[in-house]
Image (cartoon, rainbow, N blue to C red):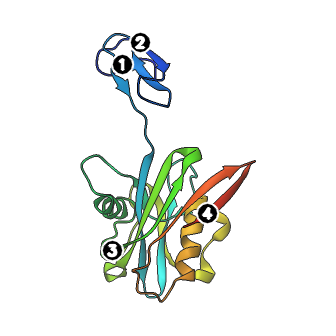
Amino acid sequence: MNFCSQCGATLNLTIPDGDTLPRHVCIQCETIHYQNPKIITGTIPEWDNKILLCQRAIEPRHGLWTLPAGFMENNETSLQGAIRESQEEANAQISNPSLFCVFSIPHISQVYMLYRGTLINGYASPGNESLKVELFDENSIPWDSIAFPVITEALKLYFKNTGSSGSITHSGDIIRHEGKLIINYY
């Protein structure tokens, strides 16, 4: 950030009084501009022992596969965002959603929240951000073409827990250490 969104003056990167981290602070109006992690929310749509994946029509990772998910918007809950993203990316309606997993990814300042739910009538079609959508069982998932490591981890957890009631919620961290991703569950 270079300029204050409140008054347009220049910002300094400094540690404000009473804080412990550097923040962008306006030299004129003294507004502190906090930058916080982004929340990504989405669904694991289930139908007939398969799950729905979307092939990305946008960057990053154009052409690779992912779950219907995206950035949470202001003034919506994480569940509302997950349902909205499913509609936008796959024209998918989800019933009986329950929180399945939460992953913190500090090296990219993101938190993923994925809900497991039933794909109503098994219907989906590509939205503006998807080249195509498809239902996959565990053996047919294009594992080498999954867009993001967090999606791979969520899918592994999902198939490990297939048959459970859906009430189990998983949480963990995906941390980059010495060029490798380390996954810690808790």
Position of the C terminus, as image quadrant, is bottom right
Query: Dot 1 lies on which element?
Result: loop
Q: Is residue 131 left or right of residue 156?
A: left
Outermost residue, left side: 75
Q: CA distance from mark 2 to mark 4?
A: 40 Å
The residue singled out by tag 2 in the image is 10
Q: CB atoms at circles 3 and 4 under 8 Å apart?
A: no
* Dot 1 alpha-carbon crowd within 10 angstroms: few under 14, some 14 to 19, many 20 or more: many
Residue nearest the observer in this picture, 125 or 135 = 135
Q: CA distance from mark 3 to mark 1?
A: 40 Å
State the residue at coordinates (63%, 53%).
Answer: 175
- Mark nearest the camera among 3 and 4 is 4
Q: Earlier in the sequence, mark 2 or mark 4?
A: 2
The residue singled out by tag 1 in the image is 4
Q: CB atoms at circles 1 and 2 under 8 Å apart?
A: yes
Q: CA distance from mark 4 to mark 1?
A: 38 Å
Splitting the image into 4 quarters, where does residue 86 fall?
Answer: bottom left
